[in-house]
Image (cartoon, rainbow, N blue to C red):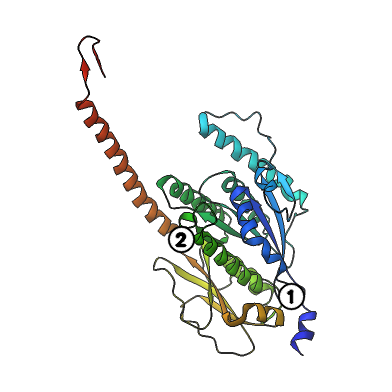
Amino acid sequence: MENKEKILTLKRNKIIVHLCGGCAANLCEKAIKELRFLGEGFAEFEFSFIDTSRNNYDSIEQVGPLFEIKRKATSLKTEISGSGGDRAQNAYDAMLNIPDYLESLRITKRETGVYHLVVSSASGGSGSIISAFLVETLMQKNIPVIALMVGDSSDALKLRNTQSSLSTLSKKAVSMGKCLLTHYINNADMGSSLTGNEDKANAKIKSALTILALFLSGQNDDIDQADMNNFINQHDYKGLSIPAGIYTLSYHSGNTDITLPDYTVPSVARTLRVGNEDVNFNLDVLHHKVGRILSENAINIMGNNLPVHIVASNGLLKEEMKRLTEANEKSAQRQKDLVNCNLEAAKHAVYDDELGIDL
């Protein structure tokens, strides 16, 4: 059967993108929204926003509906005061709103050919709170979900928040016996405005999600629904003992050797190629499967990047904990230096005998 005839018999899958908070709205505006135009051979994208207010949503192109978090925890009693109490209130509100949000989208159970991508900041803010409860609820319903998290290691506080967010997701995955795939971005090098670094980062995000949409399209030969589902939750593999927790995704193009950071341990991988072209795959993984791209549109869009590989690895939390330890040590030293500066200043303070005070 010709490729054109065969692809007509294959249903095109869907990726529902849940954009949580301001960081996700910004990322959608600058990178993700363009993916809706990929067409045949790629999964169809559907966008939905969830935030505590309309401020971020009103400043971008509205490519999907907004669900605004409502205050529900009015009787919440907590011993935490100040900003800690505010965070507890926001967290409880987010948790109570998630069922209403999913109901507004008519998402009640797992659907064949439908996948979910949850996007948010990991370094603090409402998005990281909302996304944690949303990912948890989707995993509870056994709905295939992947997280896209934007962390930040530019200072100790942001890195601590990032590590906390990733640890929370990993703990939730472990408690439910799931392997949560996460596309992780470190925002430290992106800059706060539309700089060259941010442009490069957005280009990498678009490239990575394009490969993900290609893999999850449902329009490739030799990669069936079970292959896609088992890759998303590797814990389901029969005969393999892959521990539950958070796993990072990496994407690789062409037939050159794949190099991963030293701290990562790859687990499973998928490759998509054109026809029967040779594939160079040098990683030692527990499971690897090669599929064939049927769509001429997809082949044309991917161009010379084929074949493409998508790899799941463990080790991100170990690396982030190492970074956090180093950042905490630097932060402690900086605070010590500041105290020493104050002590030095006090020694040289001018004392006014008449007033009886230090000037």
Q: Residue furthest top?
A: 354
Mark 2 vs mark 1: which is more N-terminal?
Answer: 1
Q: Which numbered circle lies on residue 316?
A: 2
Residue toward you, 18 or 37: 37
How packed mark 2 is, by other alpha carbons closer than 10 Å (few <14, some 14-19, many 20 or more), is many
Residue situated in front as seen by the camera: 198 or 87: 198
Q: What type is the residue that disc 2 sits on?
A: Leu
| Residue 169 visible | yes
- Closer mark to the observer between disc 2 and disc 1: 1
Residue that label 1 marks: 40
Q: Residue at x 63, y 50 (%)?
A: 20
Q: Residue at x 75, y 72 (%)?
A: 12
SS for dot 1: loop
Q: Position of residue 143 (x, y in %)?
A: 68, 59
x then y, percent, for residue 234: 57, 67
Q: Residue at x 58, y 71 (%)?
A: 237
